[in-house]
Image: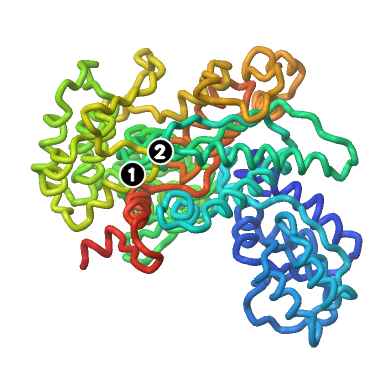
């Protein structure tokens, strides 16, 4: 494996794939074909490279659904989801004229009996192995996982949804496969919410399915609870974090620049189109992604100067064109410089957006989110903070974000006031961007009798912060409270008890005196797994690393149905009241 994936979820997933799929097939010393569906292609791409597969005697990787040439002398490994479509495609490969000599079949999750019987009926004599390996999630980063299901947002929150229960069942199955892969049997808790039952229902489903999974464990022994806690929360518990303009590198880049499938596209100085993959293999990305853009902008040129100095390059202003010249002259360190050029370009792109508009927006956003200004003076009249944003010619998208932060700061506003705001932003025909937040249990319109108690936040006045980055995601408070055993049991009921020793710090770390390193310490200690229903944002992902780094004795892993960007979230919110074919994104609207 590449150095970037030497620890964390990707390493654990690849190790399990090697111990199950690869180990079974290693017994026969012949080269094999690997056949994947869309989900398992993404899964494998996230945790290994083609060279890793070649080392295991896998010569070709094919798409299950594409037309493939028969290779009757070779054996094929099928790694796929347990769906009717996958099983049909598999049967089609063997039903009339077999494409391969034999099949080793592996499913990401539990295969229903009816599908298993269909396979048995049609191609039993070709199947050498048929196993379920419990791995139906995406290891996105070292401490981040995803269920890779953006459609779950609509299924869970749309008033027109007809598959909410089925979606929650699937998510529960996926969470069980995560726990099984980590070899954890956690205590389960959920955030209680008077309006929303989703977290409670999912917690019940996960707990029942975990009990059933470990009852039937292959070892024949019933597994006891491990030193882990799983906390389930609904997206509406913190509507602020995914809407704010974030100024840390990763969050800022995904918000302001069109990065699709983690691919950053940019133009080099000679105007040729270039692209870079932002993932764990890029060690510079891993090092910089959680830093403030001001630190990143200062750090990359320093790094380039260090390389230049080491190669006796004349000192001078670091620009993209200078780097291009250096790279042509000195192939020996081209790779080092390419990595840094990508991030110099990406940081420059972020800073362009920041200088144009974002800097002015951030002060108002932070004041509204935090409830006080830079000096710590309470914002008495949030409308005075919002008004300059409404009067300045920002784009509609940015104004909607500011209006939402204003409404969230008040825990809802009157219908009359809301109508004035909607007219001001000129979205009379698209009020759903704002109104549909109610489907997430977030108060938008309030009546005089309504009173919403704001959660008490941790005091962070002692922490050093940039003026325009004072907001801390609510989930970070939750992580720290959980690790310190301070979560209120009324607000966070136990669906199932956690082991008594689970307190994240003292009792956990006391067991670990002879470990090789701090990182090993963390991974062999307790685990806190957070699952956010309805999407997680990059600042919440960052919080998992920050808390793990601070605590050392407990690893925090965060996951969700999918990853959010502010634009994507607003489009999803608006689409909640539409029929399946009626969705219209912010970009489409602006060009309509």
Asked if the residue at tag 1 contacts the one at tag 2, i.e. Cβ–Cβ closer than 8 Å, the answer is yes
Query: At 69% from the left edge and 28% from the top edge, which residue is drawn?
Result: 520
Query: At 57% from the left edge and 48% from the top edge, which residue is drawn?
Result: 168
Circle 1 crowding by C-alpha within 10 Å: few under 14, some 14–19, many from 20: many
Residue that numbered label 1 is attached to: 437
Indicate left or right for 400 with 558 as reference: left
**Camera-nearest residue between 320 and 163:** 163
Instruction: State whether residue 516 appears in this view.
Output: yes
Circle 2 crowding by C-alpha within 10 Å: few under 14, some 14–19, many from 20: some
Of pointers 2 and 1, the one earlier in the residue sequence: 2
Q: Position of residue 280 (x, y in %)?
A: 56, 46
Q: Position of residue 1 (x, y in %)?
A: 68, 49
Residue that numbered label 2 is attached to: 236
In the rendered image, the vertical position of residue 210 relative to residue 382, given as above or below: below
| Kind of element beneath mark 1 | helix
Report how far apart the C-alphas of labels 2 and 1 lie in the structure.
Answer: 8 Å
Q: Which of the 4 quarters of the picture holds residue 417?
A: top left
| Kind of element beneath mark 2 | helix
Residue 422: mark in rendering? none
Kindly give the residue lying farthest to the left in the view shown.
391
Kindly give the residue lying farthest to the bottom in the view shown.
96
Query: At 80% from the left edge and 69% from the top edge, which residue is drawn?
Result: 32
């Amino acid at each position: 494996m590449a150095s970037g994936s030497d620890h964390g979820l990707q390493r654990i997933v690849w190790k399990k794939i090697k111990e199950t799929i690869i180990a079974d097939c290693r017994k026969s010393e012949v080269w094999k074909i690997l056949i994947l569906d869309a989900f398992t292609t993404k899964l494998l791409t996230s945790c290994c490279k083609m060279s890793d597969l070649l080392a295991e005697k896998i010569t070709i990787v094919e798409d299950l659904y594409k037309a493939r040439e028969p290779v009757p002398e070779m054996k094929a490994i099928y790694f796929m989801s347990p769906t009717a479509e996958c099983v049909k495609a598999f049967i089609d490969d063997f039903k009339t004229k077999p494409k391969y000599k034999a099949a080793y079949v592996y499913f990401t999750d539990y295969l229903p009996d009816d599908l298993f019987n269909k396979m048995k009926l049609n191609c039993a004599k070709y199947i050498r192995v048929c196993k379920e390996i419990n791995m139906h999630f995406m290891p996105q980063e070292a401490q981040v996982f995803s269920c890779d299901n953006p459609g779950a947002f609509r299924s869970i929150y749309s008033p027109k949804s007809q598959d909410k229960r089925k979606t929650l069942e699937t998510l529960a199955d996926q969470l069980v496969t995560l726990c099984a892969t980590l070899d954890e049997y956690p205590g389960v808790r959920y955030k209680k919410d008077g309006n929303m039952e989703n977290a409670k229902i999912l917690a019940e489903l996960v707990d029942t399915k975990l009990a059933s999974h470990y009852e039937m464990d292959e070892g024949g022994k019933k597994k006891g609870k491990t030193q882990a806690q799983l906390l389930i929360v609904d997206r509406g518990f913190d509507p602020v974090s995914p809407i704010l303009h974030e100024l840390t590198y990763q969050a800022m880049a995904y918000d302001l620049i069109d990065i699709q499938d983690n691919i950053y596209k940019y133009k080099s100085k000679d105007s040729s189109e270039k692209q870079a993959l932002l993932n764990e293999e890029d060690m510079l990305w891993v090092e910089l992604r959680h830093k403030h853009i001001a630190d990143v902008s200062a750090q990359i040129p320093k790094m380039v100067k260090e390389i230049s100095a080491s190669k006796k390059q004349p000192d001078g202003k670091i620009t993209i064109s200078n780097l291009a010249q250096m790279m042509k002259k000195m192939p020996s360190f081209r790779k080092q410089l390419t990595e840094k050029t990508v991030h110099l370009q990406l940081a420059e792109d972020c800073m362009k957006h920041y200088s144009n508009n974002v800097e002015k927006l951030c002060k108002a956003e932070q004041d509204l989110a935090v409830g006080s200004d830079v000096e710590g003076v309470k914002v008495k009249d949030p409308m005075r903070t919002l008004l300059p944003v409404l009067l300045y010619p920002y784009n509609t998208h940015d104004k909607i974000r500011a209006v939402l932060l204003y409404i969230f700061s008040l825990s809802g506003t009157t219908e009359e006031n809301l109508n004035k705001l909607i007219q001001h932003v000129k979205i009379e025909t698209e009020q759903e961007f704002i109104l549909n937040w109610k489907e997430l249990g977030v108060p938008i319109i309030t009546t005089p009798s309504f009173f919403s108690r704001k959660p008490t936040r941790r005091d962070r006045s002692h922490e050093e912060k940039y003026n325009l980055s004072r907001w801390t995601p609510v989930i970070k408070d939750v992580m720290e409270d959980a690790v310190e055993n301070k979560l209120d049991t009324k607000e966070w009921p136990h669906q199932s008890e956690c082991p008594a020793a689970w307190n994240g710090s003292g009792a956990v770390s006391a067991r670990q005196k002879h470990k090789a390193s701090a990182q090993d310490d963390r991974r062999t200690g307790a685990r806190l797994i957070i699952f956010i229903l309805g999407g997680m944002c990059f600042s919440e992902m960052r919080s998992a690393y920050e808390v793990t780094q601070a605590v050392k004795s407990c690893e925090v892993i965060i996951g969700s149905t999918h990853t959010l960007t502010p634009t994507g979230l607003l489009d999803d919110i608006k689409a909640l009241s539409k029929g399946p074919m009626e969705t219209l994104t912010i970009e489409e609207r602006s060009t309509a």
